[in-house]
Image: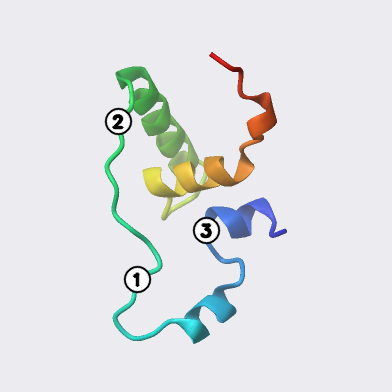
Amino acid sequence: MADAKSTLYGLEDIKEETSSKKEGENDYKVITISLYNDDIELLDNYVAQLKKEGHRRINKSKVLRYALRSLDISKIPKE
């Protein structure tokens, strides 16, 4: 598994991904999700804090991708 920085910036296995990609193909999809206002504010605060700490190219998508890769689904409570 890649370290947190590699995961955050999407650097893991980049050689393999770029060599197998055909011209014109994207390795991502644009989606729409709904978040509560408090969650959006929290996400914005994370991005602002990371930028202050020197993460020049950080954005909401990168923070969400990192969170997804760090998630332990066994700790999510059942509702």
* Residue 3 shows in this picture: yes
The reply to whether residue 59 is in sight is: no
Q: Nearer the viewer, mark 3 or mark 2?
A: 2
If you read the primary sequence from the N terminus, does the residue marked by circle 1 or circle 2 appear first? 1
In the image, what residue occupies the spot 42% across and 38% down? 47
> What amino acid is found at the position of numbered circle 2 in the picture?
Ser
Tell me, yes or no, whether the two marked residues, 1 and 2, touch with CB atoms within 8 Å.
no
Q: Is residue 41 above or below residue 22?
A: above
Residue 26 numbered tag? 1
Which residue, given by chain and number where applicable, does mark 3 sit on?
9
Q: Amino acid at mark 3?
A: Tyr
The Cα atoms of the two marked residues, 1 and 3, are separated by 17 Å
Mark count: 3
For the point 41% across and 31% down, the residue is 43
Label 3, label 2: how far apart the Cα atoms are: 24 Å
Q: Residue furthest front?
A: 79
Work out whether 42 lies above or below 79. Answer: below
Q: Check the picture and name the quadrant holding the N terminus.
A: bottom right
Q: How many neighbours does mark 1 have within 10 angstroms: few (below 14), some (14-19), or many (20 or more)?
A: few
Where disc 1 sits, the SS reads loop
Packing grade of label 3 (10 A; few <14, some 14-19, many >=20) is some
Q: Which residue is mark 2?
A: 34
Label 1, label 2: how far apart the Cα atoms are:
23 Å
Coloring basis for residues? rainbow
| Horizontal and vertical percent position of residue 48 | 40, 36
> In the structure shown, which secondary structural element does the residue marked by tag 2 occupy?
loop
Judge depth for marks 1 and 3 and give the one in front.
Answer: 1
